[in-house]
Amino acid sequence: MSRTRRLRIIVLAAQITLSVCVAYGFESVRNTLDRNGSWISGKVLLDYGIMGARTYMGAPSSLSQRRVNLGRYQGFQELLYRVPLTVRQASCDLHLEHGSYGILVFNRNDAGFSGIRVSRNPRFPGLYFRALPTGEFVQSEALDTNEDGDEGWVRVDMEFGETGFVAAIDSRELIRSNKPVVQPQTIGMRGGYVSTLVDDIHIVHADGEFRETFDRAGDFWLALLVAILAHAVADVLVLRSVRRRGSEPRRALFGMLMIGIVAAICAGATLYVYDRVISKSYLIRLILNDEDFRVRLERDRRKEIREQHAVRPPEGKTRVLVIGSSQTHGEGSSSAGEGCVDVLRRKLGARFEVINAGMRAFRAPRLARIFEEDWSELRPGIVVVNLGNNDEDVPAYKAGLARIATRCQEIGARLLFVQEANSIEHDLTHLRTNHAAMAEVAQRLDVPVVPMHDHMSEQTERGLLWWDIVHPTDFGHRLIGEFLAPHVARLSKS
């Protein structure tokens, strides 16, 4: 074989490699859950939506490496198959890291849903449960899913019969139940904060079967064909130009080879960085630094609260003002009236007027200023401050809490601090620091403190509490409101 022919073969190989990289990149960018079209997000269905819910469905990073990651965009993602099916069999592959878990959701309908939790997290062990739509467990049974095992893939299989179901992990039976399953049913999966990958879903139902591998092979082959044709056209044009000019073909081929190798290396490196780094990262606190958003929100919320509440409390009622951020506002609840402040209002009863002053993404210093300028003029009898997650500057956080306390003293309002609850599945160092700071201010100014985070940490096996690290489910909101109510009621009698 001549040296020129060998060079042409090498150039062709480099161009094919580059074409494959380009096609893979094209497929990766277009591969999203929205484009997939088979799945809906439980978070998107919430009336009080939370940050990252829509982005998760539209971002290619959720399907990096052709597997859905239930831990992306603040985790706790829930994906449900778009239509109810009369399911005979269902199976999927789960990749569990240490500290992660995956839930196969089934038997979902208006009355609630069931789940099989496969876990590598001893704090959230393997479990079969039946739950209300709010996320509260009404029945649960421990399952041996090897919480202390190494990370890796497991296969979960379920079979549904006339009188119950059987669930197995890697062909080992986990549970056999005679509890009836409502058909047709909605089926899906849910994760926690730590990454859980799902792949190779297979559902056999009354009308056929459905397979999901989360790839878009059509996009890959189309892009590969276009890239190869583009290289072919470019090669023809370059070689024609070389012949017309009488140049040395070998030199032109060598130049094409260098360009192809460099381009292939660059494309491959870009794909590797995208797959391993970029697609696994995202800005989860961007909104906290969006000043335009906060200015609009402050203007609208101050106006809304002023329009809904008279300057003076209604005769015979104790006015309670609850200050906080998005958790206080009610984000994560499925509909209006299901947030923790709404629960508090119902538990306290008609003798109290409860004002929700939750401001998404706000921190203590700004909330203190708004309270001084505006909300304190509403003359609340009790002020509840539920903070801890958003504040990053501890001295400023303490100063904001102290300013609220000073203003409460000036208007004769009683003050209650609440140590904002978070999911225990993430690093709590920052939250604990803020809780200690709140306790320090409270002790200095003689303000009672509600240990809400510690309380919620003890409720993990009662149901699904969180949609992310700070926004509760309906059940989580209910537990917060119920625990807070007696503390507020006692304060009104002091």
Image: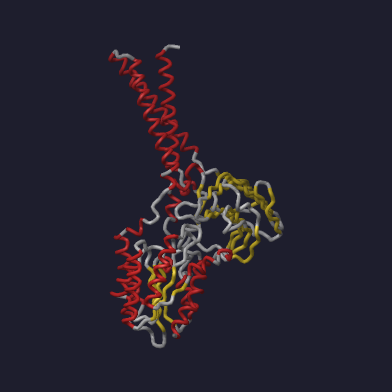
460 versus 15 height, above or below: below
Residue 442 or residue 205, whichever sits in front: 442
Looking at the image, which is closer to me, 135 or 74?
74
Vertical arrangement, residue 325 with respect to residue 246, above or below: below
Which image quarter is the C terminus in? bottom left
Q: Position of residue 251 (x, y in %)?
A: 33, 17
Q: Give the side of residue 184 with respect to residue 306, left or right.
A: right
Is 268 situated above or below 103?
Answer: above
Picture quarter with the N terminus: top left
Here the colouring is secondary structure
Q: Is residue 210 visible?
A: no
Please report the residue visible at 29 percent of the width from the left and 13 percent of the height from the top: 246
Q: How many labels sit on residues?
A: 0
> Picture coordinates of residue 194 (x, y %)?
50, 53
> Residue 102: x, y in percent?
56, 53
Q: Quadrant of residue 229?
A: top left
Q: Confirm whether residue 436 shows in the render.
A: yes
For this view, does 133 lie left or right of residue 420? right
Q: Which residue is at a point 40% across and 77% down the rendered structure image?
A: 447
Q: Choose between 38 and 170: the one closer to the eye.
A: 170
Q: Residue at x 52, y 53 (%)?
A: 79
Horizontal arrangement in the rendering, residue 149 relative to residue 252 (left or right): right
Location of residue 319 by image quarter = bottom left
Residue farthest to the top, as pictured: 2
Q: In the rendering, at what x and y percent does residue 234 appear?
A: 35, 25
Q: Quadrant of residue 242?
A: top left
